Image (cartoon, coloured by chain):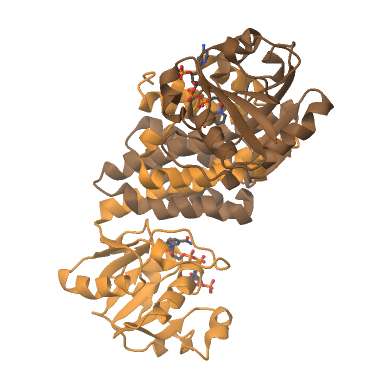
Chain colours: A brown, B orange
Amino acid sequence: MISVVILGAGNVATHLFKAFNNSNNVSVIQWFNRSIESINPYKNTVDITNDLNALKDADIYILAVSDDVIGSLSSKLPFDNKLVVHTSGSVSVYDIDKKHKRGVLYPLQTFSKTTEMDFTNVPICIETIDKKSFPILKELAKSTGGPFKRINSDQRRVLHLAAVFVNNFTNQLYRIGHEITESEGAEFDMLKPLILETAKKIQDISPYMAQTGPAKRNDKKTIKKHLKDLESQHHKDIYQLLTNSIQKTHGRKKL
Amino acid sequence: MISVVILGAGNVATHLFKAFNNSNNVSVIQWFNRSIESINPYKNTVDITNDLNALKDADIYILAVSDDVIGSLSSKLPFDNKLVVHTSGSVSVYDIDKKHKRGVLYPLQTFSKTTEMDFTNVPICIETIDKKSFPILKELAKSTGGPFKRINSDQRRVLHLAAVFVNNFTNQLYRIGHEITESEGAEFDMLKPLILETAKKIQDISPYMAQTGPAKRNDKKTIKKHLKDLESQHHKDIYQLLTNSIQKTHGRKKL
Ligand SMILES: NC(=O)c1ccc[n+]([C@@H]2O[C@H](COP(=O)([O-])OP(=O)(O)OC[C@H]3O[C@@H](n4cnc5c(N)ncnc54)[C@H](OP(=O)(O)O)[C@@H]3O)[C@@H](O)[C@H]2O)c1
Ligand SMILES: NC(=O)c1ccc[n+]([C@@H]2O[C@H](COP(=O)([O-])OP(=O)(O)OC[C@H]3O[C@@H](n4cnc5c(N)ncnc54)[C@H](OP(=O)(O)O)[C@@H]3O)[C@@H](O)[C@H]2O)c1
């Protein structure tokens, strides 16, 4: 049984708490947050605290807090030589105070507190500085039931960066789809099945193979018509740049 | 029972044939393609031909052929005053020869011949020039089992344009995610659950509400780091433009 203390009570901390709480191999023995109110609802399920000096002895301490406080919070922990991990995609493992055994448990998903999360769909990326800490972190990751992968810092860095493209930027393209359709009183809802199908398609074939459309076909007439139809210069710029990008990928044009 | 002749044997024609063939209200009485080979496998299921002069009398003729041949093929049809529709998102309904009753049956999905398509996930957009032709086209659309919607030409135009953003451009962002991860030996596969979750999220909440990440938070430190980490100028340009776009949407910055 792995004993865990979770620090932080945001999106990630809350989902991790639930996932570990459902596992037979992990016991969350304490939950810390600087403001106790947000974890108060859990006080009958787990020991809660807002006092760092009251932290219990555990196998692993998980800092699921904002990126820029990981370093300072780790320094304030009133013990040393214990395994302390953060959950960030972009923060260096060396940001954790070196008095600890240091590691990362990065769940590669988009969490929000209000949406349920099935952890079989959450790949967990793990990283430790010392080899000895690896097996227990691996056990912890496995306990969520999802896929997990040992990665190094460079790989975590690029995964996080790629996640910005496939999550934040993709979502912004959905937003532009919303703007364009509503401008003519068409319904964004009509695009939802296509959006889902586009994401499903690349579960089995590469994005390279999945590409279709006027940019890939180099259908100049349609491209020109689309650029003319777009009312906002901003939408035109994105259309042009991503069309160029597709043509670069598919050998239509050198940028 | 609505009798239909399908012309063309590409992605759309093939899926429409299957969908109508499964319906109790529609009878595909003939399938035309200029090259007979591609429809030969169906010769025991339906009457096939490559001869326009052999076309049978039907309620509706569906031109599921390349955009730029819709007009000429419609002119070559050796009859007039019948309902002739095309399946394109971008071609005008007036491209069909005016000797016919003209309409559009635009399936708002991405088709490929090799992937099965569940038509409950294919919104069908329909349009006719004369009102009298509408009810039968509506019946035909309904027979596929998916959602359908009467739209006008402007709405079809913007839906098709928006589809380029949420399908082709989104897929290109997946491709870039692939390029970035593989550059460090990380696995694109790790991003697949995130890609699916991103598409699922906006089935229930608007893309505006679903947005997260450094651009929306205006986290300048992370944005700067990402821009530095990206090796290709081309990736940098896309990162910058889509970051600006998110910030414009969320009131962070005027472009
Ligand atoms: N959200 C995601 O989709 C996602 C995905 C993968 C990884 N991550 C990473 O997971 C970590 C947490 O993200 P999140 O989305 O869960 O954040 P969040 O919802 O914004 O929650 C942040 C947490 O940090 C605490 N905190 C902030 N400043 C603090 C301070 N000075 N001292 C102590 N605690 C402080 C907050 O406490 P209060 O409640 O008192 O404000 C809150 O519990 C980050 O490293 C993030 O990069 C997030
Ligand atoms: N693919 C999609 O995801 C999708 C989605 C919605 C709407 N659409 C629209 O549906 C229509 C068909 O698209 P598709 O993807 O099915 O196309 P496709 O797979 O490329 O098939 C094109 C068809 O057009 C025929 N054709 C080409 N030139 C011709 C000519 N000069 N005379 C007679 N027939 C000719 C081809 O005949 P051969 O077999 O002899 O070459 C083939 O049967 C287009 O208007 C497209 O915009 C496509």
Camera-side residue of A85 and B129: A85
Q: Is residue A253 left or right of residue B134?
A: right
Taking the view exactly as shown, the residue that stands out farthest to the left is B131
Camera-side residue of B254 and A113: A113
Taking the view exactly as shown, the residue that stands out farthest to the front is A44
> Where in the figure is residue A143, as x and y percent of width and height?
66, 41
Give the quarter of the figure containing the C terminus of chain A. Answer: top right
> Where in the figure is residue B223, as x and y percent of width and height?
55, 20
Can residue B76 be spotted in the picture?
A: yes
Q: Which picture quadrant has residue B80?
A: bottom left
Give the quarter of the figure containing the N terminus of chain A. Answer: top right
Q: Residue at x 45, y 25 (%)?
A: A39
Can residue A241 be spotted in the picture?
A: no
Position of B21 relative to B151 (above/below): below
> Where in the figure is residue A99, as x and y percent of width and height?
74, 10
Q: Which picture quadrant has residue B236?
A: top right
Q: Residue at x 63, y 45 (%)?
A: A146
Q: Residue at x 73, y 26 (%)?
A: A153
Position of B219 relative to A209 (above/below): above
Camera-side residue of A25 and B166: A25
> Where in the figure is residue A151, as x and y percent of width and height?
74, 33
Camera-side residue of B21 and B194: B194
Q: Is residue A66 left or right of residue B180?
A: left
Q: How many marks?
A: 0
